[in-house]
Image (tube, rainbow, N blue to C red):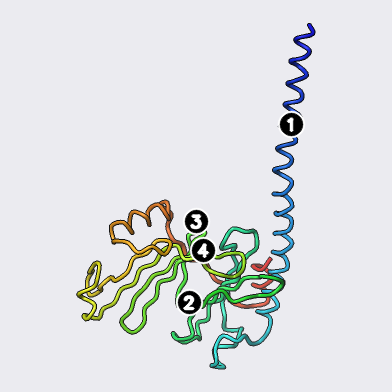
Amino acid sequence: MKKDGLLSGKKSIIKIIACLFVASMLLPANAVSAEAASQNQKALKAYQKSLSNPSYSWSSLSNENKTKDYKFACEDLNGDGVKELILYNPTASYGSGYVKILMYVNNKVKLVSTNSGFGWYKKRKIIQIDDAHTGSYWQERYKLTSNAKTREVSSYMATDMKEYAKTYKRKEGILYYTSYKIHGKEMTYRNYKKSEKKLLAGEKMITIKEHKNTSTNRKSYLK
Protein backbone atom coordinates (compact mmCIF):
# COMPACT_ATOMS: atom_id res chain seq x y z
CA MET A 1 0.00 0.00 0.00
CA LYS A 2 2.80 2.40 0.84
CA LYS A 3 4.43 1.74 -2.55
CA ASP A 4 1.17 2.47 -4.39
CA GLY A 5 0.78 5.69 -2.48
CA LEU A 6 4.30 6.75 -3.36
CA LEU A 7 3.69 6.06 -7.08
CA SER A 8 0.42 7.97 -6.94
CA GLY A 9 2.21 10.92 -5.34
CA LYS A 10 4.90 10.92 -8.01
CA LYS A 11 2.26 10.88 -10.75
CA SER A 12 0.51 13.85 -9.17
CA ILE A 13 3.78 15.81 -9.00
CA ILE A 14 4.50 15.01 -12.65
CA LYS A 15 1.02 16.23 -13.66
CA ILE A 16 1.49 19.46 -11.71
CA ILE A 17 4.90 20.08 -13.32
CA ALA A 18 3.41 19.39 -16.77
CA CYS A 19 0.57 21.86 -16.14
CA LEU A 20 2.97 24.53 -14.93
CA PHE A 21 5.14 24.02 -18.01
CA VAL A 22 2.15 24.39 -20.34
CA ALA A 23 1.02 27.50 -18.48
CA SER A 24 4.49 29.03 -18.71
CA MET A 25 4.45 28.44 -22.47
CA LEU A 26 0.98 29.91 -22.94
CA LEU A 27 1.33 33.05 -20.88
CA PRO A 28 3.97 34.75 -23.03
CA ALA A 29 2.01 33.81 -26.19
CA ASN A 30 -1.16 35.36 -24.77
CA ALA A 31 0.77 38.45 -23.72
CA VAL A 32 2.26 38.84 -27.20
CA SER A 33 -1.17 38.30 -28.77
CA ALA A 34 -2.72 40.99 -26.58
CA GLU A 35 0.09 43.41 -27.42
CA ALA A 36 -0.29 42.67 -31.15
CA ALA A 37 -4.05 43.27 -30.94
CA SER A 38 -3.45 46.61 -29.25
CA GLN A 39 -0.85 47.61 -31.85
CA ASN A 40 -3.17 46.52 -34.63
CA GLN A 41 -5.93 48.83 -33.41
CA LYS A 42 -3.47 51.71 -33.28
CA ALA A 43 -2.29 50.87 -36.79
CA LEU A 44 -5.82 50.82 -38.20
CA LYS A 45 -6.60 54.21 -36.67
CA ALA A 46 -3.38 55.61 -38.12
CA TYR A 47 -4.21 54.22 -41.56
CA GLN A 48 -7.68 55.74 -41.39
CA LYS A 49 -6.17 59.10 -40.51
CA SER A 50 -3.69 58.95 -43.39
CA LEU A 51 -6.37 58.09 -45.92
CA SER A 52 -8.75 60.72 -44.53
CA ASN A 53 -6.25 63.46 -45.39
CA PRO A 54 -6.92 65.02 -48.81
CA SER A 55 -3.32 64.56 -49.91
CA TYR A 56 -0.42 62.16 -49.50
CA SER A 57 3.18 62.59 -50.63
CA TRP A 58 3.10 59.92 -53.33
CA SER A 59 5.46 61.82 -55.60
CA SER A 60 6.49 65.30 -56.72
CA LEU A 61 3.52 65.36 -59.14
CA SER A 62 0.52 66.99 -57.47
CA ASN A 63 -2.06 64.99 -59.43
CA GLU A 64 -0.66 61.77 -57.91
CA ASN A 65 -1.09 62.99 -54.34
CA LYS A 66 -4.90 63.14 -54.12
CA THR A 67 -6.02 60.40 -51.73
CA LYS A 68 -9.59 60.44 -53.07
CA ASP A 69 -8.24 58.69 -56.18
CA TYR A 70 -6.55 55.90 -54.25
CA LYS A 71 -7.65 52.35 -53.56
CA PHE A 72 -6.50 50.40 -50.54
CA ALA A 73 -6.33 47.00 -48.89
CA CYS A 74 -5.33 46.02 -45.38
CA GLU A 75 -3.76 42.64 -44.58
CA ASP A 76 -1.33 41.15 -42.08
CA LEU A 77 1.37 40.48 -44.66
CA ASN A 78 4.00 39.07 -42.29
CA GLY A 79 1.81 37.27 -39.75
CA ASP A 80 2.79 39.29 -36.68
CA GLY A 81 -0.80 40.24 -35.81
CA VAL A 82 -0.52 43.84 -37.01
CA LYS A 83 -1.96 44.64 -40.42
CA GLU A 84 -0.17 46.51 -43.19
CA LEU A 85 -1.72 49.05 -45.54
CA ILE A 86 -1.47 48.51 -49.29
CA LEU A 87 -2.17 51.58 -51.41
CA TYR A 88 -3.02 51.48 -55.12
CA ASN A 89 -2.77 54.69 -57.12
CA PRO A 90 -4.34 54.49 -60.61
CA THR A 91 -3.30 58.09 -61.34
CA ALA A 92 0.40 57.45 -60.73
CA SER A 93 2.97 57.22 -63.51
CA TYR A 94 5.08 54.14 -64.07
CA GLY A 95 8.13 55.94 -62.69
CA SER A 96 6.28 56.79 -59.47
CA GLY A 97 5.05 53.24 -58.94
CA TYR A 98 1.43 52.15 -58.66
CA VAL A 99 1.61 50.38 -55.30
CA LYS A 100 2.95 51.33 -51.89
CA ILE A 101 3.17 49.10 -48.83
CA LEU A 102 3.05 50.80 -45.45
CA MET A 103 3.63 49.42 -41.96
CA TYR A 104 2.88 50.71 -38.47
CA VAL A 105 6.16 50.82 -36.54
CA ASN A 106 7.02 52.72 -33.35
CA ASN A 107 3.68 54.53 -33.39
CA LYS A 108 4.21 55.79 -36.94
CA VAL A 109 3.08 54.77 -40.41
CA LYS A 110 6.23 54.01 -42.39
CA LEU A 111 6.71 53.33 -46.08
CA VAL A 112 8.16 49.87 -46.76
CA SER A 113 8.31 49.82 -50.55
CA THR A 114 6.99 51.33 -53.77
CA ASN A 115 6.29 48.96 -56.65
CA SER A 116 4.64 48.70 -60.04
CA GLY A 117 2.74 45.55 -59.08
CA PHE A 118 2.01 43.32 -56.13
CA GLY A 119 1.07 39.70 -55.39
CA TRP A 120 0.97 37.68 -52.18
CA TYR A 121 1.48 34.11 -51.02
CA LYS A 122 -0.79 34.29 -47.98
CA LYS A 123 0.24 31.10 -46.16
CA ARG A 124 3.95 31.58 -46.80
CA LYS A 125 3.74 35.32 -46.00
CA ILE A 126 5.73 36.12 -49.16
CA ILE A 127 5.27 39.21 -51.32
CA GLN A 128 6.00 39.01 -55.04
CA ILE A 129 6.93 41.90 -57.31
CA ASP A 130 7.19 41.53 -61.10
CA ASP A 131 8.60 44.52 -62.93
CA ALA A 132 10.18 45.70 -66.17
CA HIS A 133 11.94 48.85 -67.36
CA THR A 134 13.91 49.79 -70.50
CA GLY A 135 14.80 46.27 -71.57
CA SER A 136 15.24 44.85 -68.07
CA TYR A 137 12.85 42.38 -66.43
CA TRP A 138 12.94 41.11 -62.90
CA GLN A 139 11.00 39.38 -60.17
CA GLU A 140 11.54 39.71 -56.44
CA ARG A 141 9.95 37.81 -53.60
CA TYR A 142 10.45 38.99 -50.06
CA LYS A 143 9.12 38.93 -46.52
CA LEU A 144 8.50 41.90 -44.25
CA THR A 145 10.38 42.18 -40.98
CA SER A 146 8.95 43.85 -37.90
CA ASN A 147 10.90 47.10 -38.47
CA ALA A 148 9.51 48.01 -41.91
CA LYS A 149 12.38 46.33 -43.74
CA THR A 150 12.30 43.63 -46.39
CA ARG A 151 14.15 40.32 -46.53
CA GLU A 152 14.54 38.90 -50.02
CA VAL A 153 13.85 35.17 -50.39
CA SER A 154 14.14 34.79 -54.16
CA SER A 155 14.76 36.79 -57.32
CA TYR A 156 15.64 36.60 -60.98
CA MET A 157 16.74 39.12 -63.60
CA ALA A 158 16.46 39.07 -67.39
CA THR A 159 17.01 41.35 -70.37
CA ASP A 160 16.02 41.52 -74.02
CA MET A 161 19.33 43.17 -74.98
CA LYS A 162 21.50 40.95 -77.19
CA GLU A 163 24.78 42.14 -75.68
CA TYR A 164 24.01 39.89 -72.71
CA ALA A 165 23.78 36.80 -74.90
CA LYS A 166 27.30 35.64 -73.96
CA THR A 167 26.70 35.72 -70.20
CA TYR A 168 23.10 34.59 -69.86
CA LYS A 169 22.11 31.46 -67.91
CA ARG A 170 18.96 30.66 -69.85
CA LYS A 171 17.06 31.98 -72.86
CA GLU A 172 13.29 31.97 -73.21
CA GLY A 173 11.72 33.73 -76.17
CA ILE A 174 13.38 37.13 -76.52
CA LEU A 175 14.61 37.17 -72.93
CA TYR A 176 18.09 36.34 -71.65
CA TYR A 177 17.98 35.38 -67.96
CA THR A 178 21.15 36.53 -66.23
CA SER A 179 20.55 35.84 -62.55
CA TYR A 180 18.69 33.40 -60.29
CA LYS A 181 18.89 33.73 -56.51
CA ILE A 182 17.39 32.05 -53.46
CA HIS A 183 18.10 33.80 -50.14
CA GLY A 184 20.75 35.86 -51.93
CA LYS A 185 22.63 32.84 -53.25
CA GLU A 186 23.26 32.75 -57.00
CA MET A 187 22.40 29.42 -58.65
CA THR A 188 21.54 27.67 -61.88
CA TYR A 189 18.02 27.74 -63.28
CA ARG A 190 17.54 24.06 -62.42
CA ASN A 191 18.55 24.50 -58.79
CA TYR A 192 16.55 27.72 -58.59
CA LYS A 193 13.35 25.92 -59.65
CA LYS A 194 13.98 23.14 -57.12
CA SER A 195 14.52 25.63 -54.31
CA GLU A 196 11.57 27.73 -55.44
CA LYS A 197 9.30 24.70 -55.24
CA LYS A 198 10.32 24.11 -51.63
CA LEU A 199 10.03 27.80 -50.82
CA LEU A 200 6.43 28.14 -52.04
CA ALA A 201 5.32 24.62 -51.04
CA GLY A 202 2.77 24.48 -53.86
CA GLU A 203 0.95 27.67 -52.85
CA LYS A 204 -0.48 29.88 -55.61
CA MET A 205 0.00 33.64 -55.59
CA ILE A 206 -3.14 35.69 -54.96
CA THR A 207 -4.08 39.27 -55.78
CA ILE A 208 -5.47 41.17 -52.81
CA LYS A 209 -8.78 42.91 -53.48
CA GLU A 210 -8.59 46.68 -53.15
CA HIS A 211 -11.31 49.13 -52.13
CA LYS A 212 -12.01 52.70 -53.16
CA ASN A 213 -10.85 55.24 -50.59
CA THR A 214 -14.21 56.38 -49.26
CA SER A 215 -15.34 57.09 -45.72
CA THR A 216 -17.65 54.06 -45.80
CA ASN A 217 -14.91 51.72 -47.01
CA ARG A 218 -12.43 52.99 -44.45
CA LYS A 219 -14.90 52.21 -41.67
CA SER A 220 -15.67 48.80 -43.15
CA TYR A 221 -12.20 47.57 -44.05
CA LEU A 222 -9.92 49.32 -41.60
CA LYS A 223 -11.18 47.62 -38.47
* Nearer to us: label 4 or label 3: 4
Helix, strand or loop for disc 3: loop
Distance from label 4 to label 3 (Cα)?
9 Å
Q: Earlier in the sequence, mark 3 or mark 1?
A: 1
Question: Where does label 3 land, which residue?
Answer: 124
Q: Residue 95: x, y in percent?
A: 45, 86
**Residue flagged by tag 4: what amino acid is it?**
Lys
Asked whether, in this view, residue 146 is left or right of residue 88, the answer is right
Q: Residues within 10 Å of mark 1 (few under 14, many from 20)?
A: few
Which disc is residue 143 wearing?
Answer: 4
Q: Earlier in the sequence, mark 3 or mark 2?
A: 2
CA distance for labels 3 and 2: 20 Å
Q: Provide the secondary structure element on which disc 4 rests.
A: strand
Q: Secondary structure at mark 1?
A: helix
Distance from disc 1 to disc 4, alpha carbons, whole Å, reads 38 Å
What residue is pinned by disc 2?
A: 115
- Under mark 3, the amino acid is Arg
